[in-house]
Image (tube, rainbow, N blue to C red):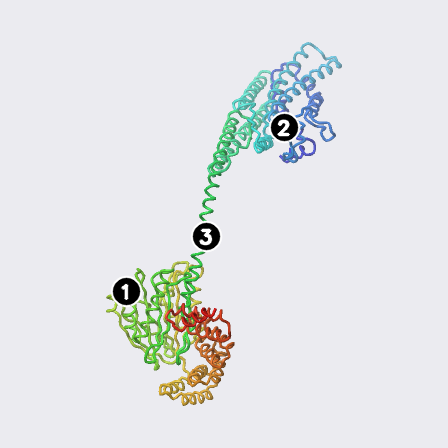
Amino acid sequence: MKFFHFLAKKISYTFAVVFLTIPGGWMGAVFGYYLASSFLLTDYELISSAIIKWLPLAVFIPTFLHYVEFGLFTPIKIPAFFRPFRLINNNFYGNRLNPNISNEDLQDLYRGFSDLPLTNALSAGFFAALVGLCEIVLIFMDFHNRGLVTYQRIQIGAKMVSIAVIIVVILYTMSTYLLTEMLTNRDRASCYNELRKRGIDQKPRVLFNLRIKFSFFIILMVISLLTFAALVQKSLFYNQSDLTTIVIYIVISILAAFFLMVINTNSILRILREMDRVALEISAGGDASFRLHSLEGEFSSIEYAVLEMNKEIDGHRKNLETMVEQRTNELQNVLADLKERDELIQKQLDMASIIQRSILPGHIDEWLEVKFSVRYIAMEKIGGDFYDVYQLKDNKLGILVADVSGHGIPAALVTTMAKIAFGNACMKYDSPRRIFQDVNKNILEHVKTQDYLTAFFITIDDEYNITYANASHRKAILVHTEEGTVELLDTNGLFIGAIEEANDTYDEQAARMNYGDKLILYTDGIPEATNANREEYSNERFEELVLKNRHLPLEDFTSYIVEDVQRFIGNASVEDDITLVVIELARDEAVDIIRSAKKLVDQQKFYEAIEHLERGLSLYPGNTKILYNLSKYYFRVNNYGKTVEYIQKYVEKDKRNKFAYYIGGAAFYQMMDYKNAIEYLEQATKIDPNFTNAYFAAGLAYKKKGAEDDALRCFEKSLSLDPDNKYAQHEIYDLKKGQ
C-alpha cells in the first residue's frame, strides 16, 4: 500500500490503480499461453518463439494507451480521459480527501469511485484483446518477411493467439476488477462517509454481488483443469511437454487460486468486522455509522439498511436528547436548590461544630502539681466525645472523659445536655458515683433520645488521692513511672442515659498518684482504630506504648501516642472520635508555699499570705503559680498596681489562662486605663468565647471609653450566654434608652 500511495502522489491516483492491476494480465497471459500451447500439434516451437519475440511490443502499445487513459501524464498537465478519474486525481492527496470539495463534485467523485472497478476491468479486457490483435499482426508480418507464411501456420497461430487472448481477457478482467476494488475500498468508504456527514443521501451503488465474484474463482479452476488435462494428454501422446512444465503450471494455478480466494475472503471479512463494530457502537449508544467497504450486493443492502436504521435512531436520539435536556434542566434546578440547602446545612453544622468545640476546655490550667495534656480529633465536624475539668467542694478537682454513642447533630445535642448535667452535678457532689447517678437521672428526664453515653470520672484532692467511677467506659491507665508498672483503673457501672436502674450499678474506687506518675483517660477511638487490613490498634498495643514511653515529657508523651495511632491507621479512614487526656503529677516546691498562703487567705489574713508568697517568689523567681496567686490576692486588697505588675509577668510566661487576663482587665478598669482593660478582657474572650463575665466587664470598659456600639455588642453577648444576668439587661436598656 505504501508503493500505491507513492505512485498516487507522484503521478496520479488512477494510474497507481491501473499500474498495480498489471499482475492480473500476466497471470492471464501465463494461463493463456499454457492452454493454447497444449492444443498445438505442429510447428509449436516456431509459432511459440514468434509469439514470445513480438510479445513485448504487442504488450507495450496497449498498456501505454491504458496508462494514458488513466492519467499517466497528469504531472505534465495531460489529465485522465474521463471527468470522474480527473476528480479522483485532483481530490485525493496522500490518501486524504480534499475537505474543500463541493457537494456536486463529491457526488461525481463517489460515482467515479463506484464505477472505477468495472471501468478499469472493461478497459483491461479491451486492451488485452488489443494485445492479441497486435500479436497476430506482428507474427503475420514476421512470417511474411521470412517467407514462412502457410495456411496451416496461419491457422495454428490464429488458433493459439485466439485461445490465449480469450483466457487473458477473462482472467485479466476478473483480476483487474478485484484488485481495483481492493485498492480503492478505503478511499471509496471515506468519500461515502463524507457524503453522509454533509447530509447527502446516497445509496451504495452495486455492481457485482458476491456470487458473481466467487464465480471468477470457479472459472479460474475450470481453465486450470482444462489446461492441466491438455498438458497431460499432450505429454503422453506427443511427448512435447515434460513433468517439470506440469509441476510449474500446477504451482502457478494454486498461487492464482489462493490469490483470488484471499481477495474474496478479505472482502467478506471487512464487512463482517464492520458489522461487528456497528453492533458494538449501537450497544454502547454510538451513532452506528456504517463505513462502506465493498460493492457486493449482499452486503451493500445491509449497509444501506443500517444507514436507514441509523437515521431513525438519530431521530429517536434527538427526541431523547431533547427530553434529557429538559430533565437535565429540571435536575439542575433541583440540584441548585439542594446545593443551597446543603450549604445552609453545612453552615449550621459549622456553627454547631464551633459551639460544641467552644464548650470543650481548649487548655486546662495546672492545678497544684497536676499538669494536663489533651488531644481531641473528631471523626466528623460534630463529634460524640467530650471532656471537662470541674472545681469541686473540699478543694478537689474533677476530670471527666465521656463518649456519646452516636455522631453528628444528635450526638452534639446529647453532648451539650450531658455537659450541662455534669456541671450541675459537680456543683452539688464531689463523689464520682453520686455525680453519675445525678447525671443519669437528669438525662433520662430531659433528653428523649436513643443515644446514651459512656464516661469515666475521677477526683483528685490536694494530697493527690484519686477517687474514680466508670460507666461502661474504657479503663483508665495509671502509669507508675518509677516502678515501670501499669495499673488499670476500673469499676462497675452501666451506660448513662440508658435505663434508670443503672444508678444501682455505679461504684467508685480509690487510688493514689505519686510524683512522676501519668494518668491516662481516653475514648475507644484509640484501641478500636483500624488500618487498611481491618486490624485493630488494641488495648495491649496501647498499654505497651504508654509504658515504653513513660519517661517522655508530658506534651511529647501525648503527641507520640496520637502520632502512633495515626501511623497505624495510615490511609484508612478514621471511624471514631479520638479523645486523649493525660494527667501528670510533677513535683513543684512552690506548691507548699501556695498551700500555706491559701490557709492564711482562708483565715482572711491576706497581707500575711502576700508576704508569704513574696518570700516564696524570691526563692523561686518567675514561678507562674506564685505570680498568679500574688495577682489574685493583691486584687483582693485593692492594690491594682501590684495586680497588673504580677499579671503582666505571668502572661509573659503563660498566655492560655483566661482568668489571668480577666483579673488584669479588671485591675486596669479600676485604674481607669480602659484601653488596656479592653485589650486584656477581649483576650480572655478569645481564649474562651463563652466567658460571660469577661464580655460584661469589656462592655463596661467600652462604655467608659465612649464606644457605645462595642459596649452594646459585649453586653448582648454576655446576656445571650447568661439570660439571667440582670446587670447586662440593665446596661443594654440604659444604652438603648440613651440612643
Q: Residue at x 65, y 20 (%)?
A: 128
User: Is residue 341 among the parts visible in the rendering?
Assistant: yes
Residue type, mark 3 in image: Lys
> In front here: 123 or 59?
123
97 shown above or below 632: above
For the residue carrying disc 3, how many other residues have a C-alpha within 10 Å: few (<14), some (14-19), or many (20+)? few
Q: In which quadrant is the N terminus drawn?
A: top right
Relative image position of residue 673 (x, y in whole percent): 51, 79
N-term-proximal mark, 1 vs 2: 2
Mark 2 = which residue? 104
Residue at disc 1, secondary structure: helix
N-term-proximal mark, 2 vs 3: 2
For the residue carrying disc 2, how many other residues have a C-alpha within 10 Å: few (<14), some (14-19), or many (20+)? few
Residue type, mark 1 in image: Glu
Relative image position of residue 263 (x, y in whole percent): 56, 29
Mark 1 = which residue? 445
Which label belongs to residue 339?
3
Relative image position of residue 413 (x, y in whole percent): 36, 63
